[in-house]
Image (cartoon, rainbow, N blue to C red):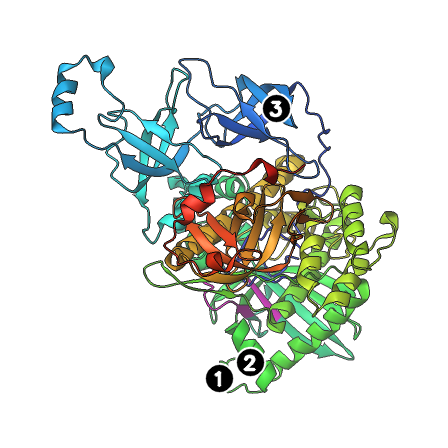
Amino acid sequence: MGKSAGNTDMPPPFRPRRHRAKDEGPPPDGGRRPKIPSRLPETLVVQITGTDTEGDAIARPADWAGNGPPPPIVMAPEPRGRPALAPGERVLARLKPIGRGRYEGRTIRRIDAAPGKVLGVFRPAPAPPLAAARTMRAAPRRLLPAHAGGGRIQPTDRRSRAEWLVPPGQDGGAQEGEIVLAEPLPHDGLGLKPARVIERLGRLGDARSVSLIAIVTNGIPQDFSAEALAQARAARGLALGTREDLRDIPLITIDGEDARDFDDAVYAEPIGTGFRLIVAIADVAHYVAPGSALDRAARERGNSCYFPDRVVPMLPEELSNGWCSLRPAEERGCLFVEMFVGPDGKKTRHRFGRGLMRSAARLTYEQVQRAEDELDHHFLPWTLPPGLLATLYGAFRALLAARVARGTLDLDLPERKVVLDAHGHVLQVAPRPRLDSHRLIEEFMVLANVAAAEELERHRQPCMYRVHAPPSEEKLEALRAFLHGLGISLPPGNQLHPRDLDRVLRSVAGTDEALLVNEVTLRSQSQAAYAPENIGHFGLGLSRYAHFTSPIRRYADLLVHRALIRGLRLGGDGITDTEAGRMAETGEHITATERRAAMAERDAVDRYLAAYMAEKMGAVFAARISGVTRSALFVTVVDNGANGIVPIGTLPDDFWFHDEREQTLTGRRTGLTFRLAQPVEVRLAEANRVTGGLLFHILQGAPDTVRARPAAASPAKAAKRPRAPARRKR
């Protein structure tokens, strides 16, 4: 498998196939949800996100769309005899303000039919001493202490700060250090909440455990039904029939080195002063009929999920790596779009069809870039027609010029590539390069996606648009104020165009402020989403845009294929009236699954990094401040992108003032100021393999004795020392 569902639509930073779609270009809310007022209503649907140190549930509004973090909600314990609330559950709660922007919540009704689940590492209770064991055997059972059998579960989610108690006989045979899934049990309201182990998932530290934690935590389906698997196994190749014969056209695939599915192919030839382009996409709609078991599985998943060690595919491998993979020299069904562009890169016309193709070569991004840079084609497959790569790059440069003229937001933010050995251990974490070969494919895919949206509008067919709203007024004002501090101005909000933001990014490129400006600009953007109502795509500067190019890993693309098939009368397997009638619901669902996948992928990378960093306790790293709050700084290590926290209690003794607008933390006595994106030196103090959390001590302002302190000098104790009242924001 090779490509990501991708959660962002800004073209850069580009994520090669294994982690990001090549036609993706920022991410989905689109300003579509109504904003929750600053004061929460008396009753509200909330989602449990973790637990406090006493084991009581912490929640947030289920559909929070306000600016900044949501106000914290501490849930009152459930009535005696009911299971405790667990992370992931949603409840209708009655809220009561308890001061300082906090609320207490009491459950009115649980919304989810199934109880929440607890994922964590099992620790058995220690066996009691022999004398105590004899006493316990003689005592009434109700007086036996909790540690007589059973154990504890340490949650893998760092937002859950309390362990769960596993009563005797409820451990399911779990062993020390195993990752387990548990469900809450009825409790008496006092002490740690009890839970029963319902599934053992493997041992912490095993090669597969890191991604598995992210998958289970985020509720990503892993198994296909027997019916869906049978349908996938029954798939066969296609005959030409009424399809257009493309087998003599030397279409090629260009993917990452580790890709296993090749669902798009490209071709270009010069036509006068312009170009003729063909983008061919695997005909997934032929194999996945509306309403079938395969279709239900694909819709439930919404997209494939990509991790450093595995892929959780949207469809079984018999299709994703088989009949829907455009393997070289093998005949495959496809939907294609033929496009004509002028020397200025603007599309003059296009045509869609259903065809049968045979890939001429499978190339990698690195191969293609080397051939372009070194003008050496001897290492390329002999099946590659002479001059094809030169023509592809010529068309790419024309399309790139059109993009620049159109004006798009081109963010430059580093991304991480986690390299594992055969045992699943991290060998290195390196920046992910962005080559012109990546951008070449991206430009071809964006043009095909635009053509698909235009074609569906022309035939008045339902379309699942990829929409991206402009930044909200509040976020723009915050961005405008931040840039003003750097001497940079923006046009008024109602006149803002993505080229204005891109102009800002270009003006700071290569300076010390570049990373800071890119990060703040990204945070100002709304998220992209899927919806049947078109509001355009702000980041790409496009009035209409739909995803057409990856139906094997994105359900939205499969719907677009079906709509094209019906609109162009290319077969009987087009979109149905039932599907068309629930497009809005489907759009909300697949937007949510995309965000779920992005969270899981990010969580897995963070956990791999925590395991990698755990071997470097006490080491000093160059880092940048990636977040500033009144109680902590967040830092990102420059070399590998590892993220961690610097509690305010570990900073030099001072009165610390937090400026939310300027994103700074300033000491009144020392004069030290920490600001977003500032370079700093940090020492790794803790690395939690269970939660994936990293804790650093910042060295700026620290005495030389601290800077030179060996790694063994009790970092946990330093991190947990009491915080002086003077450290609080005044």
Would you place residue 69 above or below residue 347 in this image?
above
Would you place residue 527 above or below residue 199 in this image?
below
Discs 1/3, front = 3
Residue 408, numbered label: none
Counting other residues with Cα less than 10 Å from the Cα at mark 3, is it few (<14), some (14-19), or many (20 or more)? many
Q: Amino acid at mark 3?
A: Tyr
Question: Residue 632 at x, y = what percent?
Answer: 57, 44
Whether tag 1 and tag 2 are in contact, CB under 8 A, the answer is yes
Residue located 56% across and 82% down the image: 371
- 1 or 3: tag closer to the N-terminus: 3
Q: Which residue, given by chain and number where applicable, does mark 2 sit on?
A: 370
Q: Amino acid at mark 2?
A: Arg
- 1 or 2: tag closer to the N-terminus: 2
Task: Examine the structure image and report whether residue 235 is included in the region drawn in magenta.
Answer: no
Name the residue nearer the viewer: 331 or 74: 74
Residue 379, numbered label: 1
Q: Which residue, given by chain and number where applicable, does mark 3 sit on?
A: 103
Would you place residue 482 above or below residue 350 in this image?
above
Question: Residue 517 at x, y = what percent?
Answer: 71, 58
Residue located 53% across and 48% down the image: 645
Residue located 37% across and 58% down the image: 615
Q: Is residue 355 left or right of residue 658?
A: left
**Region rendered in magenta:** 253-266
> Does the rendering let one see residue 237?
no
Question: Residue 386 at x, y = what percent?
Answer: 59, 84
